[in-house]
Amino acid sequence: MNDKPSVLRETDDEARKLARILLRSARHAALAVIDPETGFPSASRALIGTDIDGVPVILVSALSAHTKALTADPRASLLVGEPGKGDPLAHPRLGVQCVAERVERESPGHQRTRARFLRRHPKASLYIDFPDFCFFRLQPRSASLNGGFGRAYVIPGEDFEISSPASEAIAAGAEAIIADLQSHRLDIAGVISSRIKGHLAEDWRIIDVDAAGFDFLSGEKIHRFEFDQAIERLEYTDSYRSKLI
């Protein structure tokens, strides 16, 4: 009989929120795939974004080894979470097991994915439309969250999903919503800075929105502002702002 206590904590709302913030505030991720020739894990680094439903997205070249691997076997893992000062293992990190699905250029979601990715990674405009580049959606199946010493959790894949009837309207009106938020940046700055427990850079700006919150850039770092409850209905542009004011 094994009487050893589990090292895992019971997954609660705080753990789920931290996991979502780590994933949605990441600029890049370590991407692990299965090498089709050797069967060994193969790791690289990829720029990362998220789709309107919260699913992580990567942009890769067909010439890269990880693209060939994902085509042969769609199983992959992501690792996100930036180390800070001191012991790198003392800082939160998230490993996500995913199944990759290619986003075809002719598909309805391609232009939305492209627009969202460019708002997060504007320099990708130099190569995003090259014929050998493509997007993959990495559908989370399960995740391992280490929130720091003694704070280990298993997060089900569905906990990363943003399921809202307002998602399509928010995606279609994203540019207008972002512009509205930016025009009221002085009104919402206090709420945002208190949430991240730090000072905002003078040139901070909103870079993307979804039904569960928004992403903003302050200095060189992307932050995530998660709503307490997702938006279920978007009747007009400034109704998004009403979540903050």
Image (cartoon, rainbow, N blue to C red):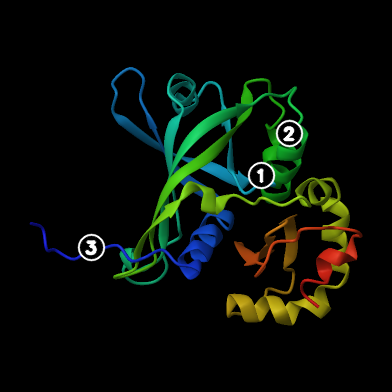
- Residue 244 percent coordinates (x, y): 77, 74
Which residue is found at the position 55% from the left and 52% from the top?
Answer: 160
Tag 1 and tag 3, C-beta contact below 8 Å: no
Q: Secondary structure at mark 2?
A: loop
Q: Secondary structure at mark 1?
A: loop
User: Would you name the residue on which mark 2 appears?
Assistant: 109
Mark 1 to mark 3 CA distance (whole Å): 34 Å
Could you tell me which quadrant the C terminus lies in? bottom right
Tag 1 and tag 2, C-beta contact below 8 Å: yes
Depth order, front residue of 165/52? 165
Indicate left or right for 217 with 89 as reference. right
Q: Residues within 10 Å of mark 3 (few under 14, many from 20)?
A: few
Q: Secondary structure at mark 3?
A: loop
Indicate left or right for 44 with 214 as reference. left
Q: Please state which amino acid type lies under the numbered disc 2.
A: Gly
Which residue is found at the position 59% from the left and 44% from the top?
Answer: 55
Against 102, residue 121 (above or below) is: below
Mark 3 to mark 2 CA distance (whole Å): 42 Å
Q: Can residue 199 be seen in this snapshot? A: no
Q: Please state which amino acid type lies under the numbered disc 1.
A: Asp
User: Would you name the residue on which mark 1 appears?
Assistant: 51
Q: Residues within 10 Å of mark 1 (few under 14, many from 20)?
A: many
Q: Please state which amino acid type lies under the numbered disc 3.
A: Ser
Label whose residue precedes the other's in the sequence (1 or 2): 1
Label whose residue precedes the other's in the sequence (3 or 2): 3
